[in-house]
Amino acid sequence: MIIRARQDTEASLPMTNPGQEEFQEWKIVC
Amino acid sequence: MSGNGAGFTAKLASFISQTDTDIIPQWAYEHAKVAFMDWLAVTFAGKDDPLVVKLMDYTDMMGGNEQATIIGYHRKKDVSSAALINGSASHALDYDDTLVSFLGHPSVTIFPALLALSEWRGKSGHEFLTAYLIGLQAGGTVGACASLDHYMAGWHATSTLGHLASAAACSRLLGLSERQTVYALGIGGTQASGLKRVFGTMCKPFHAGRASQSGLMAALLAEKDFTSAEDILEGPQGFFEALRGKVNEDIVAMMGLGWDVQNLSQKYHASCHATHSPLEAALAVIKSENITLDHIKTITVHASTLSLQAAGKTEPATGLEGKFSISYCVANALLRGVTGMQAFTDEKVNDPVVREIMKKIKVINDPEIKALESLVEMEMEDGKSFSSFSDILQQIPPLEVKKERVASKFLDLCGPVLGKRKSIALIKRIEALDALQDMGDMAESLL
């Protein structure tokens, strides 16, 4: 299987399940 | 395995080994070079940390062939030790980049192994950068599936995901087959570890080096057809089941559709992350209103409880304490405009001039302010007032701005080690990295 990257999109991977409090902790001490 | 998630490891291996180089956009390579420049800067800055010295001693004790450069030491060690030491050095100051999907710091786990392997095997700059982009994307894809649950369970994602990202990048660099890449992910995945319990100790930076080293070993073993599970990520008792997370088909479908390197967030200030929004907001007011310091009567910084807990020191006495003082960081930024390592010496923190500015600054806890946001209000002597809001989490500058800011950071961190002239020359070499025939030449300039 060959995956070809498209150049016409700028898809961004998300951080899934980012609870606000948890996200704050992550950003401070990751 | 049947049902959702079946074949995820194989799909990832296919992406790693089969993605055509010529369809990776040039802007992604430009971002990768910026990331490499940033990684080198923080590695030079961290090279003398005591934990690095201990790792040097440990690996000296073990012996080994001289294959790859230890950055800033005028020495070479075996590739495995080089990945461990350079990786640990680069995370020593916690001044390296982050990627949201990766749940942590990706570059400190990928570049060390790739640099050592590229030097040893004589790979080109383009191959090096391609492998980085592929490894970063693979790591981000697994991270997005693992979700923040993985991190909150106690896993230091930089380390766990770093094992896989390094294995992915090294597999690509070595040109492993799809099947060998599956094994490399399996070997990397089964070594994945790293607990947040050790934060605040030498083990946090060690995680970065160890992940890079383990991924390197995984790819080199897979090159010899060393076997492992073929479904390390999605399989029963595999990575996700044991360490939390699950295959997210929406994430899987994104493979090959974009390059997350553009979302890397470099740190531009050598202080606690909670000081970044206040000083950015303060600088924005000064710049937009063309204000001189003499005309400021008071500065009020609105910050969250979290930011105040992390960086609420009002009377910092040392350079280190200054990094955790919003009032010092704001005063320093306004006075000097320099927010790199050189701003955090005992002398700079205790400078009477900066102390006078700090007297004008009041940092208050504002329940309306969330996370690392900040609102800065300035009242002038003539009664006028101005304000600016900043949320550093939302501020990933465009490529051209990143280039400029990372080059400035590079000079700040490498200048004291290499000298200004050599640092500038190195910046030029990094900017032309995709045309370099042999990464050994680059490594030579990092000794």
Image (tube, coloured by chain):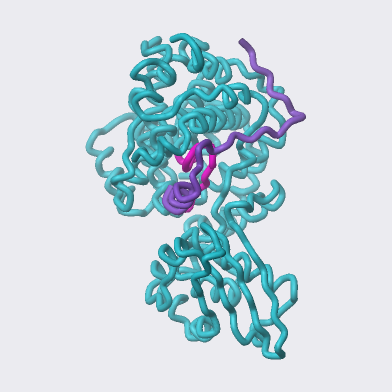
Chain colours: A purple, B cyan
Measured along the vertical axis of the image, is residue B378 above or below residue B112? below
How many numbered marks appear?
A: 0
Q: Position of residue B436 (x, y in %)?
A: 63, 33
Q: Position of residue B381 (x, y in %)?
A: 67, 90
The residue located at (62%, 62%) in the rendering is: B390
Q: Residue furthest bottom?
A: B382
Measured along the vertical axis of the image, is residue B80 above or below residue B393? above
Residue nearest the observer in this picture, B68 or B97:
B97
Measured along the vertical axis of the image, is residue A18 above or below residue B410? above
Q: Looking at the image, can residue B109 be seen? A: yes
Q: Looking at the image, can residue B119 be seen? A: no
Q: Position of residue B311 (x, y in %)?
A: 44, 66
Position of B264 with respect to B306 (left or right) is right
Q: Residue furthest front?
A: B367
Dominant secondary-structure state across the stretch colored magenta: loop
Position of B8 with respect to A10 (left or right) is left
Residue nearest the observer in this picture, B62 or B368:
B368
Position of B388 with respect to B75 (left or right) is right
Q: Is residue B101 magenta?
A: yes
Q: Quadrant of the N terminus of chain B?
A: top left
Residue nearest the observer in this picture, B86 or B440:
B86
The residue located at (54%, 59%) in the rendering is: B370
Q: Quadrant of the C terminus of chain B?
A: top left
Q: Position of residue A21 (x, y in %)?
A: 46, 50
The residue located at (51%, 75%) in the rendering is: B363
Magenta stretch? B95-108
The residue located at (37%, 54%) in the rendering is: B48
Position of B375 with respect to B57 (left or right) is right
Q: Residue furthest left?
A: B61
